[in-house]
């Protein structure tokens, strides 16, 4: 038997829920009020379900849920090539959950990408030939296509080389 909120709830805990519901029905039907049965059963069911979920060691804590939400936000920012914003979210996440290993690795990788992009962009601006400039810009485009004006500079350099 699976619980609608927690498929992993142990069958013995489910029996406790059913016992609470039976107790609610028995005490309310003794008084003869059918609507009271429904209200009492619903109230006890919610209380038992909340207790079961709270006692479930597999249930994530509020801290874990917040960390997962922050991690998801950071991943979304990465997919949008918003590396600086993603690093800021990872920083916040790691200050609250310093043991979030994947977040630390992704943050470190993004910081390396940012540094590499800035170095390669500076090298592209200082390049002595169009071929050298294109090499630096294409490297940036490989891991951060929206960095600065890389796309426009590549188009301009290719057009200049074709003239």
Image: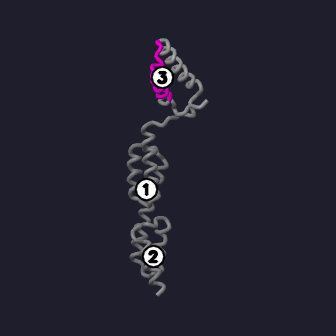
Q: How is the image coloured?
A: one colour
In the rendered structure, find residue 58 and report the number of the disc placed on it: none
Question: Is 50 contained in the magenta span?
Answer: yes
SS at mark 3 in the image: helix
Disc 2 crowd, CA 10 A, few/some/many (<14, 14-19, 20+): some
Q: Which mark is residue 38?
A: 3
Give me the residue at 46% from left, 67% from top: 145
The span picked out in magenta is 31-52
**Picture quadrant of residue 64:** top left
SS at badge 2: helix
Q: Secondary structure at mark 1?
A: helix
User: Of the residues tagged 2 and 3, which is closer to the observer?
Assistant: 3
User: Dots 2 and 3: beta carbons under 8 Å?
Assistant: no
Rate crowding at label 1 as few (under 14), some (14 to 19) or many (20 or more) other CA atoms within 10 Å: some
Q: Residue 42: image x %, image y %?
A: 47, 25
**What residue is pinned by disc 1?**
77
Please indicate whether residue 10 sits to the left or right of residue 103 in the image: right
Mark closer to the chain start, 1 or 2: 1
Q: CA distance from mark 2 to mark 3?
A: 70 Å
Is residue 116 positioned above or below 124 on the image?
above
Seen in the picture, residue 88 relative to 157 is either above or below; the reply is above
Residue receiving disc 2: 154
x and y percentages locating residue 122 in the rendered image: 39, 72
Report the front residue among 30 and 16. 30
Q: CA distance from mark 3 to mark 1?
A: 47 Å
């Amino acid at each position: 038997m699976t619980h609608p909120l927690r498929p992993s709830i142990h069958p013995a805990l489910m029996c406790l829920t059913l016992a609470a519901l039976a107790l609610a029905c028995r005490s309310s039907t003794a008084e003869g009020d059918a609507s009271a049965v429904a209200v009492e059963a619903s109230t006890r069911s919610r209380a038992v379900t909340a207790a079961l979920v709270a006692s479930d060691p597999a249930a994530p804590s509020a801290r874990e849920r917040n960390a997962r939400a922050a991690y998801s936000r950071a991943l979304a920012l990465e997919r949008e090539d918003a590396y600086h914003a993603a690093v800021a979210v990872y920083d916040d996440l790691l200050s609250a959950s310093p043991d979030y290993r994947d977040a630390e690795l992704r943050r470190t990788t993004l910081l390396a990408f940012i540094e590499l992009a800035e170095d390669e962009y500076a090298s592209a601006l200082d390049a002595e030939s169009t071929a050298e400039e294109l090499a630096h810009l294409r490297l940036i485009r490989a891991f951060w296509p929206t960095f600065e004006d890389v796309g426009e500079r590549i188009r301009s350099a290719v057009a200049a080389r074709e003239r």
